[in-house]
Structure formats: C-alpha cells, structure tokens
Amino acid sequence: AIVLISVQSFLVWMHHMFLTTINLEIKTLMMASTIGISLPFDLLVFALIYTLIKGRIKLKTPFLFAIGALLLFILGGITGVFLGAIVLDYEFRGTYWVVAHFHYVMFGGATAMIGGAYYWYPKMTGKMYDELLGKIHFAVFFVSFNMVYFSMFMAWEMPRRVFEYSQDYVEINTFGTVGGFLLGLSFFIMFYNFAKSYVHGAEAGDNPWEFTRTAEWAVPSPPPLENWEGRPSYATGRLEFLERGHAADGGRPASELASDGGAATDGGHAHADEASDYILGDKHHSHASIWPFALSLATFVALLGASGIRRSMAFVGGPNSLSGVDVVVSNPVYPALTLVGALGMLYAGVQWGLEDFFAPPAEVASRWPFDGVEKNKLGVWFFLASDVLVFGAFISAAIFIRVNSGWTSWEPLPAEIPGLVNTYVLLTSSFTVIMALVYSKRQERGKMLASLAATIGLGLTFLAIKGWEWHHEIYDAGITLTTNPHGPDIQSTLYYVTTGLHGIHVVLGLLVAGFLLYRGYQGHYMHDHRPVEYFGLYWHFVDIVWVFLFPLFYLV
C-alpha cells in the first residue's frame, strides 16, 4: 500500500489546478488518479486497524494520540474524495470545506507526532511524564480540534477569504473560534507536563513499556552517544547485537544477550564505553560536536540582523554635497546582530575545522554490498536496471512529445483487440516460466521442458500477432515509420520504434529459451535451477514493459 501511495502521489498534483485551462482529458486522468489513490490509503488504514485488533491495547497517552490521528486522517481522506471530482471541485474551491479537509489530513499526521513525543519522552529524558496530564491534554486537544475544523465542514459554502460573512455563520464561527483558543491552550498542558516531569518526574527506567521490541529500548535512558554493543539485527526474528566480524553476513549474537537468546528490551543493554570498544576496536574521542549547531545559530543571528539593516540605516547627502554621503543609524540593534552573527560564524567555522574527525573505518563500510548475490544473477539485475533506463527514456519521450503536441490530437494507431490478446499471451508466458522454474527445482525434467516449450510457443504467438499488426498498419492503413495519415508523423515513429525495441527483447528472450530447452533436453538444470531463474527475471521484465506499452499506444 505504501509503495502504491508513493507512486500515485506523483500523479495527483493537478487536482490543485482543476480550474485552469488545462484540457479536460488531462484533468480527467488526474481526477481518476486522485480518487484512485484512496484505494491504497484504504489498505493502509485497514492494515493499521487490523494491527490494533491483533495487538494488546492499553489506553496510554501515546496510543490515544495514535488512534486519534487515525480517526482524523480517515475523516480528512473521506472528505478529500469529494474534491477529487472536477465538478465538485468547481463547487467547493475556495470554501471552508477545503480548509477543513486540509487540516484534518495535516493534523492527522501532527497528532501522530504528538503521540510519538509522549512515547519517546521517557527514552529521551529518562523520566516518566504524568499520565493523567497526558490524557487531559489529549481530551482537550481532540475536542477543541474538532470544534475548530468540523465547524468549518458545517460552514462549507463560506468563502475562505471574506471581510464580513453572513449572519447565518456567526454561531458556527464563534464556536470554531472558541475551539481554536482551546486548541492552542491545550499545548501548554503538554509543555507543563514535560517540564514538570523532567524536573520532578519518576525515573522511567530503560523500558517503561511492557511489550516493546524495538532496538532503542535496549539501551539506557537517556541513550548514550555510542548506543549499542554491536550492530542491531532482527535476522532471527528477535533483536540481537552482531559481532563486528560477522555483522556483514548475518553474524551471531554478541557475547552478552538477554535470557531468551536475544537482546530483548528488558535491561540487557549496552554501555557507551563498551559499545565504543566493541564496534570500533580502539579507544577514540567522541564525535559529538557542538560546532555545527553553533554555526547554524550564528548564521541565524546574522541573517536576522541583515533582514533589518535597510530599515535601520538612512543615507543622507550625496556625491555632490560638501560632506559626501553620511550614514545615519536609527536602530543599532540590527547592525549589531549582523556583526555578532558574522563573527560567530567565523569562530564556529574555525573551531569546527580544527576538530579531529579521524575514526577507525567500520568494516561494513568497506564490504561489497552484493556479497550474498551470485555473480550471474547480479549481472542480470544490472542488465535489467540498464534496460529500465532504456525503456524509461523511450516511454518518457513518448509521453512528453504527446503532451507537447496536444493530447487530444492523437488517436491510438493500432486496434485494441490484437494488443489485448498479446497482453494475455505475454502474461500467460510469465506463468509458464514460473512453472519451468518450479519443475526444475523439483527435478521433473519432462514438465520443465514442456513449460519452456509453452513459453517459446507463447512468445512466437506474440511475435506473429505483432507482425500481422505491423503488416496491416503499413500496407492497409498506410502508416509507416515516417508517415502517419491520421495524425502527427512523430506518433507513428514512436509507435514503431518503441514496440520494435520491445519486440527485439522478445526475440532475444526466445533465443535464450531455446538454448535452455536444448540444454534441458540433454539433462541439465535438474540440480542447478539458477539459469532458469535468471531467464525468468529477464522474461518477467519484458512482460512488465508491455504492460506499460499496451495502454500507452493502444488505449489512450
């Protein structure tokens, strides 16, 4: 779900521009992607809810803010679906409905961050916050937030920017204004809670939470500079600290682990000095430096002063006057801040440069990152990565040229049915390749050969349909590499070059499949299935490329 959200996020930005003169087809495409992104978000929300169902819920302050964030985000997402429709966007644009939707989404994330502050406060300070004050903060925060922004849903037609609104909205706006003040005041509860707990709070211990299993709770609170006694790993399903000599390949637990075999978050923690020796092998100075922060602070002071110099200084006279140009400083604070900040920047930069940054190199930094990958397989992956760039360039060029030429001026050149049939043919061939790999692992030679033969047959079918399609386009429709009687000539060029490049990849794949079939007939690949697996990677890539080419040239 997160991957789908990340990809689709690049295809929804135009819903902010539905009122512009962009043509309707592009707007419709963006409308579909905007509404469609709600589907992976639904998966994500249901995954979070299912996690709560399977978890052991305790109504502590961090959980209250977490569930509050989920509720706010759900409401923000549902109300945003309305804005994804072009016709409704025309109606809702510039109204309080948009303001409310935006803040429910944004404050949903902010609410989760507040919950994180409560959750990690014991780790950061070593002190436990006041649980009662935390719950009071959540109650005031959650109620007041909904007072502010749900009232905006009720005033949904009211413009965002209006000097004097109708009397019909007085009660709603007054209600929201009271909620706004309460929302701001609610954070003083949190600030007071954190400040009081830091001074007078109870010791939190290394892990105040009963069921946590993440690595930060395996160290003291507050954590030392050198956190762990080795590289933390969950390769075995539980937290372990790997010895430096074995950390690259999965390793083994460090010498001192928790009683259950892993370094569970129950006090079996590393100390700063032990971790330093364990990881780096030699004594060394701490690399925690104050000077980067000092440099940034001095830069802020200098820029703050520079922002007011023009208003604080006046130039009197001129080149023709007897006295020349006189500078009158009406407010010396800004020039003084600029000077102090500049001197601070110089001093902090010099001190930072004088620090010794030497440290013994970590072994993991000099390790080849693909030690666990067989060389031939690594070569296939690198080849596929380069092919992604090749096809990405052609597909991107086709989209760019089409958008630049006017999207509606192009009509699909080939018929949809042959392309659809070829899509099913290639997807089926991916299945037969998988079956060939399965039978190779099972050492079932006959079934492996049959699967490879089926793959070759499907590939030849694809090429035959593609050849018939090209013959029809060239000789019946008069569409050649450089001539397109139905639209821009560049359209036919893009079609033939891109689908031709894909066809070459299909031919190359069939040659490899034929070689595998011949070698398999001789009895190979029964004890070493890797060649079949590597061919499968290539063939799946060819099929995935066609999944992009089919809608690009046949449907839109």
Image: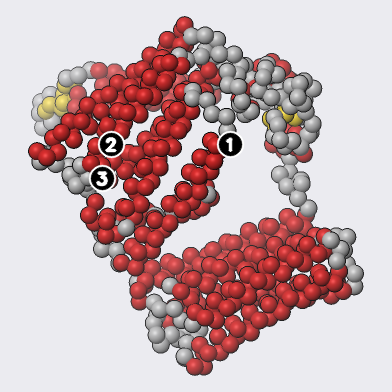
Q: Residue at x 36, y 17 (%)?
A: 189
For mark 3, what is the residue? 97
Q: Amino acid at mark 2?
A: Tyr
Disc 3 secondary structure class: helix
Where is 110 relative to 512, above or below? above
Disc 1 secondary structure class: helix
Q: Nearer the viewer, residue 342 or 463?
A: 463
Q: Which mark is residue 149?
A: 2
Q: Residue at x 53, y 71 (%)?
A: 549
The location of residue 553, given as percent across then percent down, is 48, 75
Q: Residues within 10 Å of mark 1 (few under 14, many from 20)?
A: few
Q: Which mark is residue 54?
A: 1
Point out the residue furthest to the right here.
Answer: 523
Q: Amino acid at mark 1?
A: Lys
Point out the residue furthest to the bottom here.
Answer: 476
Residue 483, quarter of the rendered image: bottom left
Residue 168, quarter of the rendered image: top left
Q: Residues within 10 Å of mark 2 (few under 14, many from 20)?
A: many
Where is 190 relative to 100, above or below? above
Q: Residue at x 78, y 62 (%)?
A: 438
